[in-house]
Amino acid sequence: MALKIQTRLFVDAALVAGEVLELSADQTHYLKSVMRLDPADRIALFNGRDGEFAARIERFARHAATVTIETQTRPQDAPCDLWLLFAPIKRARIDFLVEKATELGASALYPVMTRHTMVERVNLDRLLANAIEAAEQSERLSVPTIHAPQDLARLLASWDSSRQLMLCDESGTAPPAAAALASRARGPWAVLVGPEGGFAEDELDALRKLPFVCPVSLGPRVLRADTAAIAGLAVLQALLGDGSAARP
Amino acid sequence: MALKIQTRLFVDAALVAGEVLELSADQTHYLKSVMRLDPADRIALFNGRDGEFAARIERFARHAATVTIETQTRPQDAPCDLWLLFAPIKRARIDFLVEKATELGASALYPVMTRHTMVERVNLDRLLANAIEAAEQSERLSVPTIHAPQDLARLLASWDSSRQLMLCDESGTAPPAAAALASRARGPWAVLVGPEGGFAEDELDALRKLPFVCPVSLGPRVLRADTAAIAGLAVLQALLGDGSAARP
């Protein structure tokens, strides 16, 4: 659906007009061999802090491209403050989940361990690479923070209760998402989806008792964990997030 | 997120209590070698017409399992009437899109050709297999109809205007989805997402002039076609579809 085809890269370095930057070997390969760009072609750079800058390719060395940073094309925006808490799932599905959560504006991803979580090892480097690629392609100016896996109960024990938590609750007793969210404030939010095996009954009971938890139903069908995460983020963004506001 | 782990299979045959049914070689392999079920174990069957029935495995032959249909466990529900029109995309993404659209309750999938559609061949058998698997796993009682690819303009020329069409419009001028849908009737709906290259400007102009088209924005980021389809279906179901109603 991209209306403007442009090569955008995320970098760690500060972005200052007139400065020269050396890109990584992977980025160089991407520009040269995948996008087939040439010296003098322009790309866009962002780093999550300084907005987006145009940059001109000066030369390609074997494993490094040198670019000159030109003018700022977009100022840094205030990113969404929207977390996703999810029980890790298997490889292709977790890659997909990270890509989609990034496109939908999640600012932080928390893999959380629950009673029925089957997958315990998470390759954080791969998840971050997926998030960076999705940020580059979705015109985001920031990359979500990927946290190390942790126990859900421990994360909730130190929760700042000013952040509301939308619990994707498939038990059949939660109100529909639109009704449940109608009376809620915008503020910072998080979305929580359980593992493929579902939450244990006592986990659900404990979650529902937390004052910041808002249980919602996403409809009558049983959703896979990745589907629930994507649908939950999409619905929350549409009703209370940056998908609910007209664009400037 | 499945709360009840159960083996469910879609079959073509009529479901009548007491009748005996022979399952396909693929289904037999799945029951025997993947789910490791034994004779006398029970599964659930549905066919999109007769509701859901419990069935008892009688015996496994080499390439066929024989089951006896027992009692009806759920009556046939009135399925959602929700179409998805999408420009075909590459293999892994189209598989994923079909799976997610099925979980989210789409009743018919229409691959449509637009000016910038890059992928012209669609393996309908594979898409149907994905839809069946997703229906089995999401507790649906029906499988979406998969239509052959056709020209978008031709499909719209014979459109029944009582079906509203939510156009996922990334041009930046469409109102946010929640605002755009707030004044709309429930009725039958369809969701339309464009190809990865976007709609051509004159295609968008023509779409916006159609009386049944409701252009919506899904937020400020550029979404991949598969993300837009999933987010669009999730938001429409939450606001006007079966995700908006409390469960019986």
Image: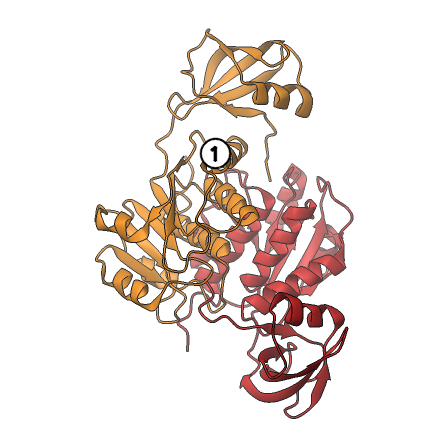
Chain colours: A red, B orange
Q: Is residue B228 left or right of residue A98?
A: left
Q: Residue at x 53, y 21 (%)?
A: B44
Tell me the quarter of the picture where residue B171 sits.
bottom left
Which residue is most to the bottom? A18
Q: Report which residue position mark 1 lands on.
A: B125
Q: Residue at x 36, y 65 (%)?
A: B200
Q: Which chain's residue wears label 1?
A: B
Tell me the quarter of the picture where residue A13 sits.
bottom right
Instruction: Work out which quarter of the rendered image holds the C terminus of chain A and state it.
Output: bottom left
Image x and y of residue B48, in percent? 40, 26
Can residue B214 be seen at all in this image of the molecule?
A: yes
Can residue A107 be seen at all in this image of the molecule?
A: no
* Depth check, front residue: B114 or A132: B114
Instruction: Work out which quarter of the rendered image holds the N terminus of chain A and state it.
Output: bottom left
The number of discs equals: 1
Image x and y of residue A93, in percent? 63, 47
Q: Residue at x 75, y 76 (%)?
A: A64
Q: Is residue A76 left or right of residue B244?
A: right
Tell me the quarter of the picture where residue A243 sits.
bottom left
Label 1: state its secondary structure.
helix
* Depth check, front residue: B140 or A117: B140
Image x and y of residue A89, in percent? 68, 45
B208 is higher (above) or lower (below) than A14: above
Q: Residue at x 58, y 74 (%)?
A: A141
**Three-letter amino acid code of the residue under disc 1:** Asp
